[in-house]
Image: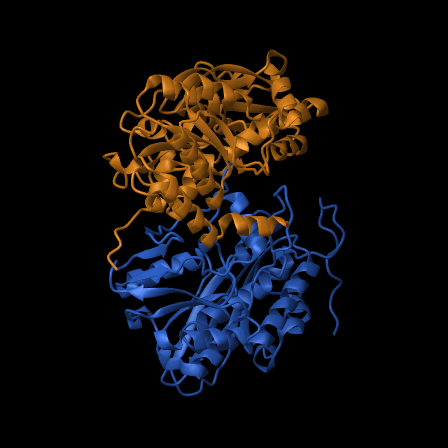
Chain colours: A orange, B blue
């Protein structure tokens, strides 16, 4: 099947409505399901899946937006880097509007900073190669999906002997944050839709252990509308059957062992660390930092940013949103003092952020 | 025709070829040579060839439409077009959207010192071609050359005058409940072609800009039933979504997009998906959105599809009295969503 045909099938509305009908047929009780990935949140809200599900089946939106969970302190460090004369700061596009303590990277660029949007970390390596007289930092954020590419950038820079390239790291991992959410017990989730793209890299093993420990069903799910609906169907079927365990809806991409080459790169470059999450606080062993061998590529060390510490805004409730404790429209400042135009928190900025998804696809009562 | 030998490579430049220098903008002999050899060669006509300080025009009876636009696109050459045909088509389309037959254009150039003459010739040739296709004459112009860094290679301003069809009037104030919204073809091609042509994506594509003069198509639509056309707009920066948001606000009614009705080429849809961008807000340079009386919508779609710049036209939505000033979308599962225009520039997402 060609990619475009595959895409068309995974979005076909008739197919989606059929899966929706199948969910209605098997659901006998209310269930609370959490989709982990921000891309899934975006697709669910954009297609109106959450509004169309049978009464009683509630979607709770999870913490899986990498832009949203990047700590304000790291954004402040990026702003500090962008202000260094001669510095070229490279970033994924949707980090540019994320507010730090004061301003964002768009403002830093307007103030004369050389802030560049790149589409791949390797592009930042090429910029470093082309600008030997200048320092180039790549703002390396993300979940397990982006970690291998960020690691590749470090390996490429090492191989080329580039001394003017480094990365500002905020790498996070899914299983530890899910464990933290379950342990905190603030939100009752009956089952999880795990992020298909993350599992494409890491495989399923970490989720087996998690499912056993917490006795919850998990369905590894793709990001297209019909993938998500099918994932919900699998999950409801497991819940109705009283089964825990891991099922793989996204078998066209996810293999049990993951992508071994990508995992090799991650393990070569990064090591697990305790990591701060925006809105969620510090979670043990939930992030990745550069291994000692690659400390020369650590922008925080190279530019002496260890002492730059900052606290998050108390007004922004993105932590509660990321944990699924509240929906964005339950936040007092949602859509008023906090909009994509003047966001208080990152969840209102990223295209994968739950608050932005709610704002951009605001439900509206059907009066027709 | 004789002229001084053109200046060869600029000091400090390693590129080979003739280049525009400050002398070309001095108003002296070099300026005259540039005008004659480049501009008149590419798009000369009886009026322009006189090289008077202003063009003298004989407008036919009727109302006139008058518009101006400035073009700073980067890159200046991209698949499907360049800054030259863009500058002609952009102003031609702005005139056509008032129901005018575009007649005369002005062209103002701001050129950075060191700009390759061959590129200027190529741009002007494409302006000449575009003007010919749109049936307009470039009747007056101006050239300024600025020092290096004074502008980014070349900026072009065009202004234009067109003559509005007798008895035709349009605008959002004519939009009524029940009206239909039509788009003249697949959306988002220009914006994505330019983004790809910046050459910084780690993937390649065959996406071509849709840049085209819509005046011929508009003339056919008006001939087919001008009284049933409520409002027309070319969906340039901000895309179809921004135009419809403005229509809804201006007419005080709601516009609801039908599920899965928006025509988007597969390649454009795929590129937008990868970057996390909604094609609804991506720029077009040869697409128009118009609102029609309900009964006439399908006939207008047929007119579009019969025109070479209207293949893939479709009815994409309807006007309702509820939700005044709002643009909405009906999801495939039947619920209604508000559509919000993006805040600023479209920023590609992380993954």
Residue A274 % position (x, y): 46, 14
Of residues A12 and A314, the one drawn nearer to the viewer in this rendering: A12
User: Which quadrant is the N terminus of chain B positioned in?
Assistant: bottom right
Report the residue that reaches farthest toward the bottom.
B61
**Does residue A102 sit above or below B229 in this rendering?**
above
Count how many numbered circles sit on residues in the image: 0
A329 versus A139 height, above or below: below
Q: Is residue B63 visible?
A: yes
Horizontal arrangement in the rendering, residue B81 relative to residue A96 (left or right) = right
The vertical placement of A183 against B61, above or below, is above
Query: Is residue A311 or residue B334 the one in the foreground?
Result: B334
Residue at x 52%, y 21% (from the top left corner)? A206
Instruction: Residue A89: give x, y in percent of width and height.
Output: 53, 31
Coordinates of residue A312 in the picture (x, y in percent):
34, 23
The residue sitting at the top extreme is A292
Q: Compare residues A263 and A349 and report the one nearer the observer.
A: A263
Residue at point 67%, 64% (across, down): B121
């Amino acid at each position: 099947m060609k990619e475009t045909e595959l895409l068309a099938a995974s979005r076909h509305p008739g197919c989606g409505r059929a899966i929706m009908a199948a969910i209605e047929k098997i659901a006998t009780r209310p269930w609370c399901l959490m989709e982990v990935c921000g891309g899934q949140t975006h697709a669910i809200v954009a297609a109106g899946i959450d509004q169309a599900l049978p009464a009683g089946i509630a979607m709770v939106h999870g913490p899986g937006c990498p832009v949203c969970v990047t700590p304000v302190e790291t954004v402040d460090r990026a702003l500090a880097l962008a202000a260094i004369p001669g510095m070229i700061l490279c970033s994924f596009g949707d980090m540019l509007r994320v507010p730090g303590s004061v301003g964002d990277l768009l403002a830093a660029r307007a103030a004369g900073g050389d802030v560049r949007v790149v589409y791949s970390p390797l592009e930042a390596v090429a910029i470093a190669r082309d600008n030997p007289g200048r320092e180039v930092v790549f703002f390396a954020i993300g979940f397990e999906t982006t970690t291998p590419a960020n690691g590749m950038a470090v390996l490429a820079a090492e191989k080329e002997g580039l001394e003017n390239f480094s990365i500002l790291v905020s790498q996070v991992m899914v299983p530890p944050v899910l464990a933290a959410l379950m342990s905190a017990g603030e939100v009752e989730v009956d089952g999880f839709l795990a992020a298909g793209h993350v599992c494409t890299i890491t495989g399923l093993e970490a989720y087996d252990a998690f499912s056993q420990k917490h006795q919850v069903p998990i369905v590894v799910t793709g990001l297209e509308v019909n993938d998500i609906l099918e994932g919900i169907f699998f999950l409801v079927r497991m819940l109705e059957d009283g089964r825990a365990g891991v099922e793989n809806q996204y078998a066209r991409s996810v293999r049990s062992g993951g992508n071994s080459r990508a995992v090799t790169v991650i393990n070569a470059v990064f090591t697990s660390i305790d990591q701060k999450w925006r809105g969620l606080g510090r979670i043990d062993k939930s992030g990745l930092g550069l291994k000692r061998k690659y400390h020369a590529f650590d922008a925080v060390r190279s530019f002496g940013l260890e002492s730059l510490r900052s606290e998050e805004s108390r007004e922004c409730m993105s932590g509660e949103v990321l944990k699924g404790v509240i929906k964005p429209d339950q936040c007092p400042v949602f859509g008023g003092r906090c909009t994509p135009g003047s966001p208080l928190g990152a969840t209102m900025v990223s295209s994968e952020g739950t608050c932005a998804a709610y704002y951009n696809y605001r439900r509206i009562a059907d009066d027709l | 025709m004789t002229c001084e030998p053109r200046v060869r490579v600029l000091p400090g430049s390693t590129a080979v070829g003739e280049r525009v220098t400050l002398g070309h903008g001095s108003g002296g002999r070099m300026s005259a040579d540039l005008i004659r050899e480049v501009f008149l060669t590419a798009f000369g006509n009886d009026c322009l060839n006189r090289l008077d300080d202003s063009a003298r025009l004989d407008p036919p009876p009727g109302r006139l439409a008058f518009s101006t636009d400035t073009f700073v696109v980067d890159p200046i050459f991209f698949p499907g077009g360049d800054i030259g045909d863009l500058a002609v088509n952009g102003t031609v389309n702005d005139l056509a959207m008032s129901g005018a037959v575009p007649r005369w254009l002005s062209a103002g150039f701001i050129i950075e010192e060191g700009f390759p003459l061959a590129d200027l010739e190529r741009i002007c040739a494409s302006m000449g071609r575009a003007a010919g296709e749109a049936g307009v004459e470039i009747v007056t112009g101006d050239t300024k050359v600025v020092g290096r860094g004074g502008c980014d290679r070349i900026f072009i301003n065009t202004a234009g005058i067109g003559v509005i069809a007798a008895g035709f009037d349009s605008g959002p104030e004519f939009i009524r409940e029940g009206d239909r919204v039509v788009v003249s073809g697949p959306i988002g091609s220009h914006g994505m072609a330019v983004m790809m042509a910046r050459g910084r994506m780690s993937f390649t594509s065959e996406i071509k800009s849709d840049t085209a003069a819509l005046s011929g198509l508009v003339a056919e639509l008006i001939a087919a039933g001008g009284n049933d056309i409520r409002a027309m707009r070319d969906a340039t920066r901000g895309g179809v979504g921004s135009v419809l948001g403005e229509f809804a606000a201006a007419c005080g009614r709601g516009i609801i997009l039908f599920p899965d009705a928006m025509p988007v080429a597969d390649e454009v849809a795929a590129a937008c998906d990868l970057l996390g961008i909604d094609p609804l807000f991506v720029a077009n340079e040869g697409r128009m959105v118009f609102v029609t009386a309900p009964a006439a919508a399908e006939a207008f779609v047929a007119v579009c599809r019969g025109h070479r710049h209207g293949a893939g036209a479709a009815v994409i939505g309807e006007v309702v009295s509820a939700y005044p000033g709002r643009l909405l979308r009906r999801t495939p599962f039947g619920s209604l969503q508000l559509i919000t225009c993006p805040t600023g520039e479209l920023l590609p997402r992380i993954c």
